[in-house]
């Protein structure tokens, strides 16, 4: 039963945003429809997680930061990601708008479109309309409806047919000063193309109580290969909602590598819809829970195509009084003969007050398939610690080495070495608190 809801965003501000940006009429209508849906829809129902008790009202107001021309213009946390100069293909969103955008000449010459989504809405409205909020539907729940109404900045990445792009495309999203932060990332890889996209989500100066509401949609056409890597590192004051969804056609593949390194409450939902025959998805997620934060992480693969395959690995390390609900869902629909879905969820507990639940779920509606799962929740193996100590390593160092080894299968999959080092540093920082 739906109930009337007082929204955390102002209807007039949403309408004014659309008007001042001179958005197409269909987008203006979509935003208003999102608000109407949000008033009636309920919050997402999550396994063993009461998000109605979280901070869900602090969306903030629309603020636009000054343009960025060099690394020194960014907060210190962001500067460490780049060194002395920016990457060749990079978009930076700070507060509610994009402050830096550059696509490499090589990619542009190949016909690749890489720009912020607001700009793409002006230059390529038909392409944006064809895919926007098609993988993640506007009316799924109150959070997705609100996102469709308030989204800002974002990324549009379009790769033409048969184009193979070697250099990764990068994005940095910085939330600060109570600004609405709801980036929408839209990636379209046409047939037989390949592309890698990497993003960081961080907090800048003046972080307040805040809700970050982001969505990533990926469309991999026949034979396309898409890699997506995402690292979220937001402070205790920020509540983070992340929906990532891929639609995968015949013989196409999508790989997600996710580092959920937030310090506040977070919901992460990463889903692959394997529509095509021979389609493939590979999702790897790690998180380190600290303090009293509450995490709900879901990885999901839905098989529609024949001989489609999926792999999912989630590894979580929980300390202090942190709580994590880890859900792995493999759904094989009727007719998806020859499908194969494998998943693993492992939780390592470092404190008697921490909690981690691993919930592997197999939903099979077809006979001629393979599916398997493995799940475990436990503490650091004392025999492994003893072995390392027998080689002259201290107990504390031995435990850290075991934890780093536990997370390594995901950390090592980050497609940019500097960001792999950054993720390793974040792991060490959270474990050293």
Image: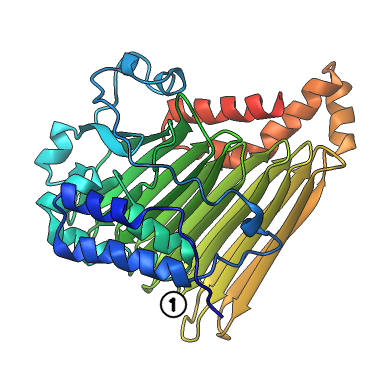
Q: Nearer the viewer, residue 275 or 326?
A: 326
* Quarter that holds the N terminus: bottom right
Identify whether 394 is placed above or below 361: above
> Residue, x 33% and y 50% (percent of image)?
185
Residue 145 % position (x, y): 40, 64
Per the image, the residue denoted by label 1 is: 304
**In this figure, what is the number of numbered marks?**
1
Q: Nearer the viewer, residue 206 or 409?
A: 206
Residue 233 % position (x, y): 53, 34
Q: Is residue 90 visible?
A: no
Left or right, 379 with respect to 255, comes to: right
Left or right, 182 with respect to 222, comes to: right
Residue 116 % position (x, y): 23, 43
Element carrying mark 1: loop
> Residue, x 50% and y 66% (percent of image)?
5
Q: Is residue 400 visible?
A: yes
> Residue, x 35% and y 43% (percent of image)?
197
Q: Nearer the viewer, residue 291 or 319?
A: 291
* Quarter that holds the C terminus: top right
Identify whether 323 is placed above or below 330: above
Residue 87 % position (x, y): 29, 26
């Amino acid at each position: 039963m739906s109930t009337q809801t007082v929204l955390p965003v102002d209807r007039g501000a949403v309408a004014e945003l659309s008007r001042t940006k001179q958005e197409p009429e269909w987008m203006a209508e979509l935003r208003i429809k999102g608000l109407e849906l949000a008033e009636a829809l309920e919050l997402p129902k999550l396994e063993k997680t009461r998000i109605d008790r979280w901070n869900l009202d602090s969306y903030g107001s629309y603020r636009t930061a000054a343009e960025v021309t060099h690394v020194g213009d960014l907060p210190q946390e962001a500067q460490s990601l780049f060194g002395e100069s920016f990457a060749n293909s990079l978009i930076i969103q700070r507060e509610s708008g994009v402050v830096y955008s550059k696509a490499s000449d090589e990619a542009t010459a190949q016909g690749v479109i890489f720009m912020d989504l607001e700009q793409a809405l002006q230059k390529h409205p038909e392409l944006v309309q064809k895919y926007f909020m098609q993988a993640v539907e506007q009316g799924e729940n109150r959070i997705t409806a609100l996102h469709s109404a308030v989204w800002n900045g974002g990324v549009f990445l379009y790769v033409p047919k048969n184009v193979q792009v070697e250099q990764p495309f990068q994005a940095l999203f910085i939330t600060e000063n109570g600004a609405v932060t709801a980036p929408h990332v839209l990636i379209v890889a046409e047939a037989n193309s390949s592309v890698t996209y990497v993003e960081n989500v961080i907090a800048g100066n003046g972080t307040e109580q805040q809700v970050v509401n982001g969505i990533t949609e990926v469309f991999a056409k026949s034979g396309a290969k898409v890699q997506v890597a995402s690292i979220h590192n937001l402070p205790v004051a920020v509540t983070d909602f992340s929906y990532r969804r891929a639609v995968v056609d015949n013989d196409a593949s999508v790989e997600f590598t996710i580092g959920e390194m937030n310090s506040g409450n977070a919901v992460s939902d990463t889903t692959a819809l394997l529509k095509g025959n021979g389609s493939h998805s590979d999702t790897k997620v790690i998180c380190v829970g600290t303090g009293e934060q509450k995490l709900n992480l879901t990885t999901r693969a839905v098989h529609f195509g024949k001989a489609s395959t999926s792999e999912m690995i989630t590894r979580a390390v929980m300390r202090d009084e942190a709580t994590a609900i880890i859900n792995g869902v493999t759904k094989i629909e009727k007719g998806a003969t020859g499908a194969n879905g494998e998943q693993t969820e492992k939780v390592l507990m470092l404190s008697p007050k921490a909690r981690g639940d691993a919930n592997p779920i197999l939903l099979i509606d077809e006979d001629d398939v393979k599916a398997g799962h493995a799940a475990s929740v436990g503490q650091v193996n004392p025999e492994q610690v003893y072995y390392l100590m027998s080689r002259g390593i201290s107990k504390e160092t031995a435990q850290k080495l075991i934890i780093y080894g536990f997370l390594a299968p995901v950390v090592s999959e980050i497609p940019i070495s500097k960001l792999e080092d950054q993720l390793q540093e974040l792991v060490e920082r959270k474990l050293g608190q």
